[in-house]
């Protein structure tokens, strides 16, 4: 089909030139020599991916803790037979040899334990979403600074290969100034029925979409979002209790982002991300967040990088690896709790907008109600 401009028709090129994809550092990185014993607090379902990633990376997990000690024992048996197990996190935190803790608990019970870990002088990787109260999050950031320890957030989606490659392409200036991020996620989230997640009111916009809000901020992080307009609704046939259909429009001073989520799509699952810049456009698409192909379109042609890895479990390798590297290099991690508060400001505003039916300025909503 020909293209139309104000002055004339332009015949499209027969095919785009195939370009060599840029080599970018999108895969998880390991520290050069820093290899501290790690403690895991909380041994629920998601920690199977944590430990699978840590074991593959060669990280040393020395202690596992869960109120239901049999869960900690099961994780020990499967992944780290030499690790110690505890039912009280304070026992784990008393250990001088453990310098880093991964706190993989639900947000409503996590903050006090993060505080305990910081007071004990431990570096912390907190599960996401980081906090339910932005002011509490700021206090934890300040406490980490006072204790001279690092507080990072497990935004594991940062190291999904497609997200990571696009982020690195944007950071390298290959896209030029970004003016748009468009996301469409169509999958089946009814698996949450009868689980603890089935009680989360803003399941999609809060617990799930935080990965995509964080991706948007990782691309447009220097720009402050002006307002967000979001909505959510139940699908007629969904089995889960929370609304599984949600969307959000985000306005930046010179850019926009649109996010659409259909969590009740049982057929033809699809996931697509489009990041448009003045110099190039990055498009990632696939049948799931784990199976994606990235294409970089520019005036010269199209490049298709050969990506390796999967979001699960490699994303968890990425977050812990980034925390360890940042400690070794004495720098803030790219997933610092301080920077993550900007992603949460956007997320909280989206939840409030969906409740109020009106646009909300990120930063004006300090707490997420009935998350």
Image: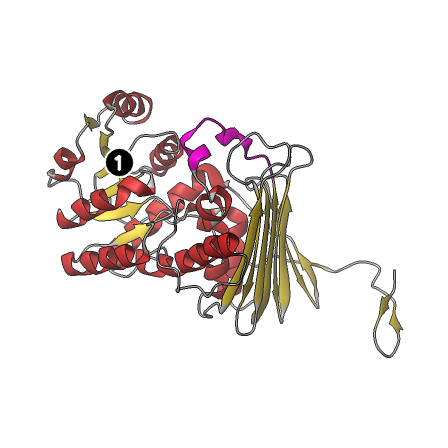
* CA neighbours of label 1 inside 10 A, class few (<14), some (14 to 19), many (20+): many
Image point 42% across, 55% down: which residue? 348
Q: Position of residue 50 (x, y in %)?
A: 36, 36
User: Picture coordinates of residue 222 (x, y %)?
Assistant: 44, 70
Q: Quadrant of residue 137?
A: bottom left
Residue 83, picture quadrant:
top left
The answer to whether residue 19 is above or below residue 106 is: below
Q: In front here: 288 or 236?
A: 236
Residue of label 1: 40
Viewer-side residue, 230 vs 37: 230
- Magenta span includes 193: yes
In this picture, residue 250 sits left or right of residue 29: right
The reply, left or right, for residue 325 in relation to residue 155 is: left
- Taking the image as shown, residue 5 lies to the left or right of residue 134, namely right
User: Which residue is the extreme one toward the front?
Assistant: 356
Residue 232 higher or lower than 366, as above or below: above
Which residue lies at the image location 39% right of the left edge and 51% below the top edge? 368
């Amino acid at each position: 089909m020909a293209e139309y401009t104000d002055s004339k028709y332009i015949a499209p090129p027969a095919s785009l030139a195939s370009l060599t994809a840029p080599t970018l550092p999108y895969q998880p990185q390991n520290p050069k020599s820093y290899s501290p014993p790690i403690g895991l607090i909380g041994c629920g379902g998601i920690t199977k991916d944590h430990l699978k990633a840590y074991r593959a990376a060669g990280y040393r997990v020395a202690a596992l803790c869960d109120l239901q000690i049999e869960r900690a024992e099961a994780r020990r048996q499967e992944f780290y037979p030499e690790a110690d197990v505890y039912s009280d996190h304070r026992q784990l935190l008393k250990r001088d040899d453990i310098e880093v803790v991964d706190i993989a608990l639900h947000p409503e019970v996590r903050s006090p334990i993060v505080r305990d870990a910081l007071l004990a002088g431990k570096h912390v990787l907190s599960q996401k979403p980081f906090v339910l109260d932005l002011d509490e999050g700021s206090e934890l950031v300040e406490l980490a600074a006072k204790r001279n320890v690092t507080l990072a957030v497990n935004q594991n989606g940062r190291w999904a290969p497609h997200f990571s490659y696009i982020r690195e392409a944007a950071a390298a200036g290959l896209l030029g100034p970004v003016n748009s991020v468009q996301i469409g996620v169509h999958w089946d989230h009814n698996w949450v029925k009868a689980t603890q997640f089935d009680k989360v009111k803003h399941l999609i916009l809060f617990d799930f979409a935080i990965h995509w809000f964080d991706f948007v901020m990782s691309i447009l992080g220097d720009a402050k979002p002006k307002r967000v307009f979001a909505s959510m609704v139940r699908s007629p046939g969904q089995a889960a209790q929370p609304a599984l259909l949600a969307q959000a429009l985000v306005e930046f001073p010179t850019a926009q982002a649109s996010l659409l989520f259909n969590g009740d799509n049982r057929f033809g699952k699809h996931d697509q991300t489009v990041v448009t810049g003045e110099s190039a456009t990055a498009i990632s698409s696939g049948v799931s967040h784990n199976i994606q192909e990235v294409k970089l379109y520019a005036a010269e042609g199209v490049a298709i990088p050969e990506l390796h890895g999967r979001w699960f479990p490699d994303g968890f390798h990425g977050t812990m690896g980034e925390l360890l590297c940042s400690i070794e290099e004495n720098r803030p991690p790219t997933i610092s709790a301080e920077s993550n508060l900007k992603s949460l400001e956007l997320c909280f505003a989206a939840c409030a907008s969906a409740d109020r039916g009106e646009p909300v300025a990120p930063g004006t909503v300090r707490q997420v109600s009935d998350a």
